[in-house]
Structures are given as C-alpha cells and as structure tokens.
Image (cartoon, rainbow, N blue to C red):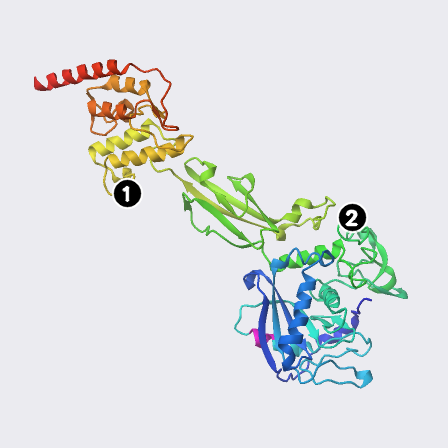
Amino acid sequence: MSLVKRSIFIALTVVLAATPCVYGQTVTTVLDNGPSNNRIDLVFVGDGYQESEIDSTYDGHVQDEIDYLFNGAFRNPFPRYQNFFNAHRVNVISNESGADQPPNDIFRDTALDASYWWGGNVERCLYLNTAKANQAVSTALAGSSIDVDARLGLVNDDKYGGCGGSWAVYAAGNNAATDIGVHELGHSFGNLADEYWTNGTTYTGSEPGAVNLTSNPSTGKWDRWVGYNDPETPIGTIGYYEGGGYNQLGIFRPSINSEMRSLNRPFDAISREQFISKFYAEVDPLDGYLNNQFDLDNPETVWVDTVDPEVINVEWFVNGASIGNHGESLDIESLNLSPGQHTIAARAYDAILDHSFTGDNLDWWRREDTSALQQSVEWDVDISYTGDFNNDGSYTCFDINSLLLQIVIQADLTFDMNDDGLLNEADIDTWLAIAGARELASGNPFLRGDANLDGSVDASDFNIWNESKFTQSPNWCSGNFNADLAVDGSDFNLWNSNKFSNSDNHESSLTAVPEPDSLLLVIAAGLALLSATRRR
C-alpha cells in the first residue's frame, strides 16, 4: 500500500520560533565512497532512539536501509550508482522510544517530536520537526566537509507510516520500513509525485511540475519513453495511464504500477531517469585528473580518476580525433606522436549514453541534454625526442653526425646524451640505444659499425667505411664510429668486432660480404700506405 503526500506539507514550511537544543548530535559515517564534494551525502537522522539503542537498533535500521537501497534490480538506479554515495548516521538521543499518536492519546518524549497524523488528517503520515532535525544535523556536522544532499528520517516505531517533505521519514521498525524509505526518498530527493488516487476524484489544476505526472498527454511530456518495456523489471509498457496524484481522472502517469504508486515495485523509466538527473546534479564523472594548467613536456601518460570506472567510460582524443576508449590512463609513448605540440583530451561519460534508445537493460537516459552525464578535460602536450636533433621524428644520419661533430669540437652540451656533463663516446652509446629503441623492431641498440643505420653490420657498412678510409670526417655515416675525426683502422676494428651481427637478433647476416682475407689485405695495404705517408 502506498504512502500519502498531500498538500498538508505546505504547513511544514512553518517552523517554530524557538527551537530547544537537541540531545546527542554526533555523526558516524557508515558508507564512504570518496570525497564529499563529489558524492551524494545521504544523511540519516533518527528519532525515538534512546541512548542504549543508538549503536544497536538505530545502527541496524540504518544498515537495513542502505542494504535495501543499493541491492537488487527493483531499486534501480541506486545499485548501479552506489559509488556515487556516502552515508552518515547522525546520532540523536531521545528519552523515550516510539512516536506520538495524538488521536490515541499516545505521546512519546522524543528529541524530534515524531508523530503520526502529522498535520492532523492522515493516520499514516508520520513526520518529524524539521527545524529540530536540521539543527541536530548542523550541530553534528559542524566542522566537517559533509554537504547534506539527501535526508532520511528514521523513527523508532513499528506502526506503518511515513511521509516525504524535505525529509523522507518512515517508521523504521515496521516490516515494510525499507521500502517506505525508498518511496519517500522518491519524494524528498527525486521530486517525484505519488501516482495513486482516490476513486471518484478529478484533477482540475495546472500542469504538474513533477516529471511523472501530466494533465495533458498531447504535450508529450515523456513521449521519448512511450512504448518502452524495461527488460529487467516487470513494470509494463510506458504510456499515458489515467489516474495519479490522488485523482482518478484528468491526470496521467507513465506506467501501470510503479514504486510511486505501490510499494515493492520498481521505479519506472521516467522516475529512474529523474533520479539519475539528480545524481549528476551533485556528482561529476571525474574525481580528478592530471594537472592541465601548464603544457606537459614528453609525459609518459596522462590520466583521469573517474568516480566509478564500472559506470564511467573514458574516450580519448588526439588532436581532435577519437582513438576510442582506453580506460583511465593513456600511454603517450605508445601513440608515436611526431615532435611538436599536440592536444590530448579525455571525455568521461556515463556508459548508459551508449545505450540510449536501444531498448536494452541499460537504456536509462533519453533526455536530449546529456551534458551533466559527461565531463571533458584536455592537455597541451609538447613532444620531443632526445637525440632527434632536427625534430623530424626520426633518428637518422643527420642526428648522429650532428652528435659526433659536437663531440669532436666540444662546443654544445645540449648534445650531452647521458647528462654527465661531458661530450664523449658514452654519448654515442646512449644515442645508439635511444635510436634503436625508437627505430628498430626489437628496440635493441644500433651497433658500432652500422654506418647506414639499417640494423645490420655488414658489407654495405664496410663499403661506406672503405670509400672514406684515411680521410678526416666527423660523420658516423662516413664510417667514423668513434668520433676521433679520422676514418681509419680504429673504425674498421669497431666494424670488424660486430661484423655479420644484426641489432634485432644478433645472428649472422646473410648479406654477401668480401672474404675476410681480402678485407684484411685491403686494410693492411691501406694502413701501410697511411703509415708511409705520415713518415714522409
């Protein structure tokens, strides 16, 4: 049986001129899923709980409601968005248990004045003094970062009852307590209207503000959902069904029988969508992200921290082009970006947007405006490669020739590849390792003697050395492998020590090369000629 939410709640805006102090007023966090500034803080306050019942009966009632709210398909969308919530129990101590029942001459000495027949007309309308409840919460939360977003008032009584105003109040000791709490949360947090009615009544007012009632189906208030039949819950086909808001005629609801009409029913698509809208009014898809206030120089990764990776997808963009979903971090090195500035962007969005209008079990959002369900962030990234001295994105003869020249003339420490403050052969080895990692399939270093930087030390490299032998040249690609300016026997020895080797597999090359004896004869003759020239 559903609960009443009538116009009597206009009276709830009137508060007492003087509000006495409330006894107790401490807080216990019972669910912590993240920073309060990006979570829905669900705050419980209890009335009719004596001091001995705070950590037993009251705590049990709070846990029962949390468990019920976040488990089971009937409670959707709450289970999917559990990580969007924190929950806090404000502990208020009453002198007596229970709630007032004025017509039955029953009055309990409780801290928040909980009473059935609140407003004087409806027996099961159980409510409490909101001024006192708000004061108790403010006192308990003073100095904390908790921002109250949703309010549940638990009354320690087993008589069926509850009402929804600024607080969702219910009898926590009743067998239907947890479901009453969910229904009342539909009022106080979701701004949903009741969908039941009294026979023989006709609605004559203006268009209702609640999303789940309309006085005129032709306005198409929820046309986007008409014909939808939830595959997970037996809610029936969405349409325009007459009756709701306490009137049998002249007003229409979206479904035959949802939680806002009867207890122990699912929320229909319109109510579920409304809750999601309320969730994202309090929560952004991202808890944080890599600082983007300054350009990033050669970052290894960029990252975002989603509120829940099971709910939030992250689509990544490079220079405006989507590269798909890659989780919460993106490996920049794997992109092989060219040198220069690039824009990297991430769009964090609720995965239900991928299911809109599909009719499947995550088709939960059909509103045109999707902005609240997504969040974008971008970074300016500057890419350069150590040792790529002309910033063309490749490691070529130009780069290593430039390095060897600087080693010879000792002019520019920006060519110091290993940051040891020196320009020497160690920088050559560092360049060969970095260039090999970038250019070769294996990622192994280039080898000394590989004059043409093709990954193999073979006849083609010998021929390059041979053409320049006994000349002065600082160029690696002319056969100078040790940066001593002269292309001579020492460079041949470096080629010879690695001959027939391949950077990728270090196995013998199949490339035809001169016979070793012929090579040695050539070298011996050349060295003899060089020696004779020097003697003359």
Q: Residue furthest left?
A: 536
Mark nearest the camera among 1 and 2 is 1
Name the outermost residue toward the right. 200
Q: Are marks 1 and 2 in contact (CB under 8 Å)?
A: no
Q: In the picture shown, does residue 213 fall above or below 367?
A: below
Does the magenta stretch mainly form a helix, a strand or a loop? helix
* First along the sequence among labels 1 and 2: 2
* Other-residue count near label 1 (Cα within 10 Å), few / some / many at <14 / 14–19 / ≥20: few
Element type at mark 1: loop
Would residue 251 be counted in the magenta stretch?
no
Q: Which residues are magenta?
A: 137-141
Q: Nearer the viewer, residue 404 or 264?
A: 264
Circle 1 residue: 419
Q: Is residue 161 above or below residue 113?
A: above
Rendered residue at 65%/76% (across/down): 133
Q: Quadrant of the C terminus?
A: top left
| Residue 167: x %, y % from top left | 69, 71
Which of the two residues, 191 or 67, is positioned nearer the viewer here? 67
Could you say where residue 152 lies in the image, as x and y percent from the top left?
A: 68, 70
Residue where numbered disc 2 is placed: 228
Check disc 1 and give the amino acid type: Asp
Distance between the alpha carbons at the discs numbered 1 and 2: 66 Å
Q: Residue at x 75, y 67 (%)?
A: 180
- x then y, percent, for residue 350: 62, 50
Between 332 and 129, the one lying in front of the other is 332
Q: Amino acid at mark 2?
A: Tyr
Question: Dot 2: within a 10 Å radius of its alpha carbon, few (fewer than 14), some, or many (20 or more) residues?
Answer: some
